[in-house]
Image (spheres, rainbow, N blue to C red):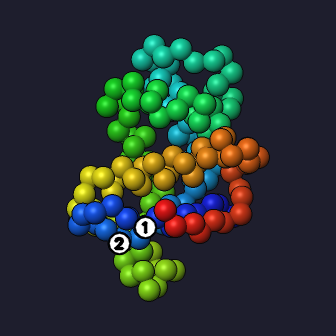
Amino acid sequence: MRKTEKVTIDAEGRDKGKVFQVTEMSAVAAEQWAMRAFFALANTGVELPEDIAETGMAGMASVGLQALGKIPYEAAEPLLADMFDCVEIIPDPSKPNVTRKPMDEDFEEVRTRLTLRKAVWDLHTGFFSQGDPLTSASQTSNSES
């Protein structure tokens, strides 16, 4: 079962209180995402360890979000879009099992989108810093952020 995390927007603003669910990518999708990111980084001249492509998301965790900031927008945009494939909104928090893909109108603050990107990143790479095994399937987590 893929890991999931519920993210409640706590920051002051128009999105405060909205609840989203972030779901881990499949192993295939995560590997493809990581490989595209590695190739984009390599094409920018960022020095990467020789074996990094074999490490998938663990390698991405070791490279970090800052390195991804060196990718030109044209190469990064599809990667950023794929991150949002992991996000669903819970339109009515009293019905936490009812989710849907978010629409542009669901976001009124840029900060909300950045919070959700970080949640997606952490869900996929958090195992690296927590010492969890390097598997794509783990128990489901329903922690509030």
Identify the secondary structure beneath mark 2.
Answer: loop
Identify the secondary structure beneath mark 1.
Answer: strand
Residue 124: mark in rendering: none
- Is 70 displayed left or right of 47 in the figure? left
Across and down, in percent, residue 27 comes to 65, 48
The residue to which callout 2 is attached is: 17
- Callout 2: few (<14), some (14-19), or many (20+) C-alpha neighbours within 10 Å? some
How far separated are the C-alphas under marks 1 and 2? 6 Å
Across and down, in percent, residue 5 comes to 55, 63
Across and down, in percent, residue 4 comes to 58, 63
Circles 1, 2 touching at the beta carbon (< 8 Å): yes
Q: Residue at x 46, y 26 (%)?
A: 67
Q: Residue at x 63, y 65 (%)?
A: 141
Examine the rendered structure and indicate whether residue 7 appears above or below residue 123: below
Q: Residue at x 68, y 32 (%)?
A: 55
User: The N terminus lies in which quarter of the figure?
Assistant: bottom right
